[in-house]
Amino acid sequence: MNLTQASRNVTGTFTLDDLEFPSSSGTVAPNGGLTLSSTLEVEGVSSIVADWTLMKSSSGMGGTLSLTLTGEGVSGQVKVVGQINAQRQ
């Protein structure tokens, strides 16, 4: 993930292996939280939606990354959720 911030506005891109998601932007909330979402259309897979929820803490940054995959010609979806815990060094 590569993020750029100007005041409270954040823009960034996300790469998962060799899949590069379109740019996403959001505004930092008064409590320091940030939510970003980006949808990648992939041949053979209808789409992959990446949802980031980030929160600054005194020791670093935490939050979740949720990937939701939908397939062409099939019903339902696959959802993978991971926890983010980045500590300052």
Image: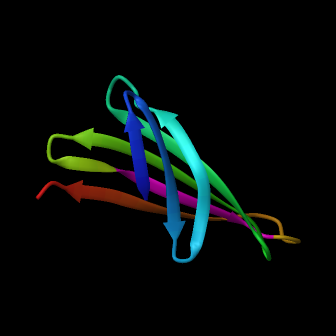
Quick one: 76 or 5, which is closer to the camera?
5
Is 59 on the left-hand or right-hand side of 68? left
Is 68 on the left-hand or right-hand side of 13? right
Is 86 on the left-hand or right-hand side of 2? left
Residue 58 x, y percent position in the rendering:
15, 40
Is 25 located above or below residue 2 in the figure?
above
Region in magenta: 63-71
- Quadrant hosting residue 86: bottom left
Is 46 on the left-hand or right-hand side of 81? right
Is 8 located above or below residue 2 in the figure?
above
Q: Residue at x 35, y 22 (%)?
A: 30
Which image quarter is the C terminus in? bottom left
Number of numbered labels in the structure image: 0
Is 2 located above or below residue 71 in the figure?
above
Magenta span includes 68: yes
Q: Residue at x 27, y 40 (%)?
A: 56
Dominant secondary structure (helix, strand or loop) of the stretch shown in magenta: strand
Magenta span includes 66: yes
Q: Residue at x 43, y 62 (%)?
A: 82
Residue 18 x, y percent position in the rendering:
56, 77
- Quadrant hosting residue 34: top left
Is 23 located above or below residue 19 in the figure?
above
Quick one: 44 or 75, which is closer to the camera?
44
Q: Residue furthest right?
A: 73
